[in-house]
Amino acid sequence: MASWRTGGCVGMGLLIAGAAQGGDLATATRLATGEWQVTVPYLTFEGSAWQGTLRGADLAGLNLVPESVAPLPTNRRAEGLALLRSGTPWRLELALAEYLSAAGRETYRAVLTSDDLNHFALNLEESAPLGRWQPAPGGAWQIQLDGEIDTTPPVELFDIDLFDTPASLISERHAAGQRVICYFSAGSFEQWRPDAADFPALVQGQPLAGWPGEWWLDIRQIDLLAPVMEARLDLAVSKGCDAVDTDNVDGFDNDTGFPLSAEDQLNYNLWLAYQAQRRGLAIGLKNDLSQVAELVEQYDFAVNEQCIEQQNCDLLRPFVTAGKAVFNIEYSGDPTTVCQQAQAFGLDTLIKQLTLDAWRYACHSP
């Protein structure tokens, strides 16, 4: 049986949820009275951000509980679910939904309509697939962020710099049957980037140790960072990137100069995933191992550095268990030992130089 899924509750083949920003999923609870109660953490209602509860005798007929509706804090973004009234009918807009059927899984924007909030029906005319590609585990890959791109390795995908890579090279890789992941830093300010002047000084913090010309960002300030990061994602779309590798998204675990919390990081990383996926881009979680369990469902794959050297690869197991690719990079170690451990953890591992130039040692051929 086919169904829609956004992380919430099932009814009439439809799963309704409000998570896309901030990490919480809509939850369905069977009350002692026998009624179903659906708590929606994030929705937009008549132009403002709110949270609320729907309740009904069954999941096919849910009513909004007026006394449950409350405004969200101003620093929380609510773009994932919108409940709107513009004349008749009511519209429930799911910015990201998954359609599950015997044919597999596709990502959609979904619109449901209701005359009275008692029953929602899928509006097929306004619902459309996003067509997002997701890398499969076990594929041969290459990452190169320095020097002229060497396209000779017989790999399935390249991870290359968003700004330094011309659209023509991406087109050539597509013509050769390869995919392209475009790298950019989403958690640091790099003074040499062409959009450096677009970063307000207010969001620039401590320098990244060992990386001259680079400073941590205050990822709490999503409203200030959004124009820059959304423009970068738009650039990725315009160049034809299939996915993005967003670096430095673990600032809360570093000395950034800002009092970043784990919740701040989750909010920002979920916002990044939403913004990428709504554009049809897959997105990889870069490092941030302590939050893998909270982010694995929202991210399409993982990119990790040095988990074998640092002996924390087990934290990536949720991606492996979910059938999602984990692209691992190691910069040291005996190749035989490294590759044996990578195979045991189910990682797609390359041994690279720290400069991430063209040289590579792949743990499996080619």
Image (cartoon, helix red, strand yellow):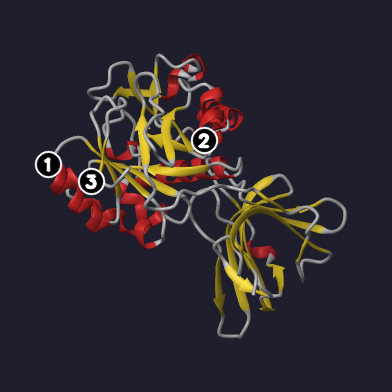
Q: Amino acid at mark 3?
A: Cys
- View extreme (right): residue: 87
Residue 361: percent from left, percent from top: 24, 37
Q: Position of residue 45 (x, y in %)?
A: 70, 51
Q: Which mark is residue 70?
A: none
User: What residue is at 20 percent from the left and 35 percent from the top?
Assistant: 331
Q: Residues within 10 Å of mark 2 (few under 14, many from 20)?
A: few
Disc 1 residue type? Asp
Q: Nearer the viewer, mark 3 or mark 1?
A: 1
How far, Cα to Cα, is label 2 from label 3? 32 Å
* 208 and 222: which is toward the camera: 208
Within the image, what quadrant is residue 77 found in?
Answer: top right
* Spatial separation of the CA atoms under disc 3 and disc 1: 14 Å
Residue that label 1 marks: 334
Give the percent coordinates (x, y) of residue 228: 53, 26
Q: Earlier in the sequence, mark 1 or mark 2?
A: 2
- The three-letter code of the residue at mark 2 reads Ala
Instruction: Choose mark 1 or mark 2, whichever is in front.
Output: 2
Residue 357, compared with residue 89, is above or below; it is above
* Up/down of 342 relative to 118, above or below: above
Earlier sequence position, callout 3 versus callout 1: 3
- In this figure, which residue is indicated by the disc labeled 2? 176
Dot 3: element: helix
Residue 339 seen in the figure: yes
Instruction: Tell which tag, 2 or 3, sits nearer the viewer.
Output: 2
Q: At 75% across and 52% down in the image, what residue appears? A: 84
* Residue to which mark 3 is pinned: 307
Residue 211 in the image, given as x and y percentages of width and height: 27, 21
Q: Quadrant of residue 304?
A: top left
